[in-house]
Amino acid sequence: MKKIILLVFAIALSFSSCEKDDICDANTPTTPRLVITFYDYDNPSVLKTVTKLKVVGAGMTDGIIFNTTATDDSKYLTSGSTISIPLKTNEDTTSYSFTLNYGNANTVFVNEDNIKFDYTRKEVFVSRACGFKTLFTLNTSNPYTHTDATVPDTKWIKYISVEKSNIENENETHIKIFF
């Protein structure tokens, strides 16, 4: 009888040190990126594909990686109608240069515009495993500043529209860019 009690006690003791694994599930929503969709300026209801777009954060040399399987500079380029870019979680502004037709041999077709996004931040607790995520709200009076490149030419971005000021997920377009 003592052996059975001792065995039950040993088993119970071995389970008492187990605790739940703190692993953040990959499907858990974390800090959302800013979703930008591109449209035709002359026909605003039609999506338009950007060609060889490179997006680089201010003060950075490398662009945002859009193609994780590429091993050369093409990993920084995208050709599509929608992109998602991160905002800084430790500042209230994030600046990017958007270069259309990056790397084109004919530099006449290469055009760079700069956009600075202004927003407020709010940290929200997700879980013990995932920690906090940051939610953003674009400023209502001045959500962005659009300027030309350092070497001025005509802006390739004709108009910017804020569709959703609250950036809480990546399931919807936050900004529309018309060109």
Image (cartoon, rainbow, N blue to C red):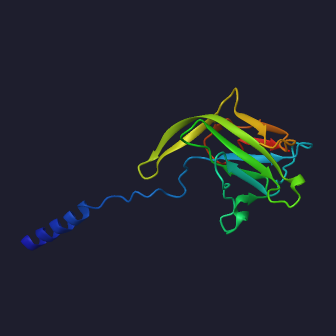
In this view, the residue farthest toward the right is 42
Number of numbered discs: 0
At x 72% / y 44%, what residue is drawn?
173
Give the image location of residue 51, x and y in percent: 83, 56
Give the image location of residue 142, x and y in percent: 70, 29
In this view, the residue farthest toward the top is 141
The answer to whether residue 79 is above or below residue 3 is above
In this view, the residue farthest toward the left is 2
The answer to whether residue 165 is above or below residue 39 is above
Give the image location of residue 9, x and y in percent: 15, 65
Image check: 64 left or right of 15? Answer: right
Q: Quadrant of the C terminus?
A: top right
Nearer to us in this view, 168 or 149: 149
Q: Quadrant of the N terminus?
A: bottom left
Image check: 12 left or right of 38? Answer: left
Q: In which quarter of the view is residue 7 placed?
A: bottom left
Image check: 112 left or right of 59? Answer: right
Nearer to us in this view, 16 or 8: 16
Give the image location of residue 135, x and y in percent: 57, 40
Asked whether residue 113 is in view, the answer is: yes
The answer to whether residue 170 is above or below residue 143 is below
At x 67% / y 68%, what residue is drawn?
69
Asked whether residue 1 is in view, the answer is: no
Q: In which quarter of the view is residue 118 placed?
A: top right
At x 53% / y 58%, what residue is drawn?
26
